[in-house]
Amino acid sequence: MAEHDKITPYLKEETAKKEQVAEMFDNISHSYDFLNHFLSMGIDKWWRRKVMKLLKMSAPKQILDVATGTGDLALAALGANPDKVIGIDISGKMLEVGKKKILRKNLSDKIEMIQGDAENLPFGDQQFDAVLSAFGVRNFGDLNKGLSEMSRVLKVGGRALILEFSIPKNVIFRNLYYFYFCNVLPFIGKMVSKDSRAYSYLPESVRAFPDGDKMAEILKNCGFKKVQCIPLTFGISTIYWAEK
Ligand SMILES: C[S@@+](CC[C@H](N)C(=O)[O-])C[C@H]1O[C@@H](n2cnc3c(N)ncnc32)[C@H](O)[C@@H]1O
């Protein structure tokens, strides 16, 4: 097992990472959207819009959003004018929040939310024109398995767009970022979400996660080619844009 797959939310050796991750997102689902926008000072919305701009370039009709959570990327993906977006997530409670948003916006005919595991996607080979994931892949129990599944369900020539946290290259900015990410963010996150580990697991999992060229290499080993890394906001996050 790779080192990054061993980073777990609740540090319980007897419980698989996947189960701990599902439990954690169930626990924080009620405050997830608020904390996401608050702790990132709204920058996460800009990052998702950037993904959407790239998505639009290939005019996909069938889109899969893996680890869709409360559905913000699935909703943003409608900007590419697809026929259908399917969002899949392992956490039932994150999906409940997402489903309510979709109902409120009257978009149930365009977006379908289903519960399932990214490492065993319930879809046939080459079913989608585009496969997306925002801040999801870092949480997979087995990164290679999840990425290989994303490649399997993508049509040949289709695009995957993966948005994930990364480590800024500039030393001064990196230190400022670590201070915020490892001290301020866990403190506020714990207070608001009432989960003592979720917002400590976040920086721990980001620090252990492969980024840039390492992630590009992993994507190539999982069935993708022409992988481009697009760092955003001094490299706090990166879009991986890959073709099957
Ligand atoms: C940080 S949230 C991101 C949610 C959403 N994509 C966003 O941008 O806000 C990570 C999501 O990944 C989901 N997840 C983690 N492992 C998963 C797996 N193996 N299969 C499906 N979903 C998974 C979690 O349940 C959680 O909703």
Image: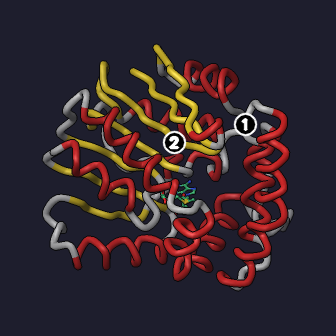
Residue drawn where x is 35% and y is 63% of the image: 114
Mark 1 surroundings: few (<14), some (14-19) or many (≥20) residues within 10 A: many
Q: Earlier in the sequence, mark 1 or mark 2?
A: 2
Q: Relative to 109, is 44 on the left or the right?
A: right
Q: Is residue 146 above or below residue 136?
A: above
Question: Is the shortest distance between ligand 1 and the CB of mark 2 under 8 Å?
Answer: yes
- Residue 28 in the image: state x and y as whole percent: 60, 77
**Horizontal and vertical percent position of residue 228:** 50, 21
Name the residue carrying label 2: 163
Please give left or right for residue 109 compared with residue 17 in the image.
Answer: left
Q: Residue furthest front?
A: 172
Decide: few, some or many residues near mark 2? Use Cα within 10 Å; few <14, some 14-19, many ≥20: many
Q: Nearer the viewer, residue 159 or 125?
A: 159
Compared to residue 45, the image places residue 195 above or below, namely below
User: Which kind of residue does numbered mark 1 sit on?
Assistant: Pro
Q: CA distance from mark 1 to mark 2?
A: 15 Å
| Residue name at image x 65 percent, y 65 percent | 19
Residue 86 spot, x, y in % from top left:
29, 54
On-image quarter of the C terminus: top left
Up/down of 203 relative to 145, above or below? below
Q: Identify the image quadrant of the N terminus.
A: top right
Whether residue 175 sits left or right of residue 22 in the image: it is right
Q: Amino acid at mark 2?
A: Leu
Q: Is residue 242 left or right of residue 157?
A: right
Q: Which residue is mark 1?
A: 168
Choose top left, top right, bottom left or bottom right for residue 173.
Answer: top right
